[in-house]
Image (tube, rainbow, N blue to C red):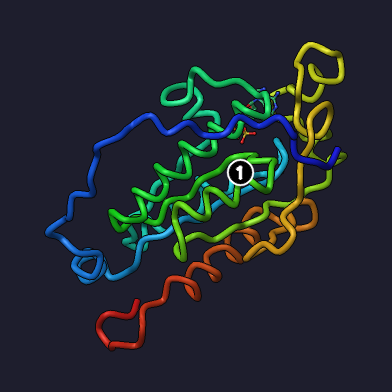
Amino acid sequence: MEGYPDQRQALIVKSSNVTNVEHKVSSADRTARSGHRGGVLWFTGLSGAGKSTLAMAVEQYLFQKGFHVYVLDGDNVRRGLNVNLGFSPDDRAENIRRVGEVASLFADAGFICIAAFISPYRADREHARAAAREGFHEIYIQADLETCERRDPKGLYRKARAGAIRDFTGISAPYEEPASPDLAVDTAGNSVEDCVQRIVDYVDRAFALAPLGEDAW
Ligand code: ADX
């Protein structure tokens, strides 16, 4: 199940004669107002591993703590922005490319953007990392296939096993595990609360501002 498709379509750049327009509000200005940096928490993992559950719980926790935070979730984004994309390797690459760019914009705007996508191909995740640069944090939401299939919250594994869904991740399409994620959270052996706590602790470390007294949170 490992391996990246050879026949990838290179991104064709069609926009020309476009220039960068400078903002008059700097990212330091935004950080000073909100009290924290922007960045991307990229949740990757199998369907049913718990990405959406943890993303929404972490969003709620951070929001209540006063953070600017927003979740981009695969199922939601595929109902709007990416409604024209399916699950072929090329379509997944385009899904992740667009979301990587959008997440990077959220980060520039000063938000902690939680992107919850299967994102099964390492190369696609690396493109998303490149878009958000040093603000990108890869978080592996880890659960073995057997556990995900037993949970089957949307009944999709059952359909995939029956042949009713093609190219289903883990069954008939690959999932390339992160080689060295910034954080791995095992949802098979830990409660939702414990997983949320681990992620929040990570955010605390990763997004802490330099110790400037009142700036720190
Ligand atoms: S990704 O692979 O391109 O990153 P994404 O996270 O956006 O996937 O969407 C995954 C969601 O689409 C799953 O949670 C599931 O509800 C739905 N889905 C429908 N068909 C498939 C499929 N063939 N493989 C995986 N997920 C699918």
The spot of residue 94 in percent (x, y) is 54, 32
Residue drawn 34% across and 60% down? Answer: 67
Q: Tell me where residue 72 appears, x and y as whole percent.
A: 46, 40
Instruction: Rate crowding at label 1 as few (under 14), some (14 to 19) or many (20 or more) other CA atoms within 10 Å.
Output: many
Residue located 71% across and 64% down the image: 180
| 115 displayed left or right of 174 | left
Looking at the image, the residue that sits furthest to the top is: 164
Nearest to the observer: residue 36 or residue 81: 81
Asked if ligand 1 lies within 8 A of label 1, the reply is yes
Ligand 1 shows up in the quarter that is: top right
Q: Position of residue 45 (x, y in %)?
A: 69, 45
Q: Position of residue 141 (x, y in %)?
A: 68, 51
Seen in the picture, residue 122 relative to 217 is either above or below; the reply is above
Judge by depth and name the residue closer to the eye, 77 or 186.
Answer: 77
The residue located at (29%, 87%) in the rendering is: 212
Callout 1 secondary element: helix
Please give left or right for residue 162 compared with residue 205 in the image. Answer: right
Residue plotted at (71% across, 29% down): 7
Tell me the amino acid under the disc marked 1: Asp
| Residue 211, image quadrant | bottom left
Report the residue marked by disc 1.
124
Total count of labels: 1
The answer to whether residue 204 is above or below residue 68 is below
Relative to the observer, which residue lies in front, 84 or 207?
Answer: 84
In the image, residue 165 sits, relative to residue 91, either above or below, namely: above
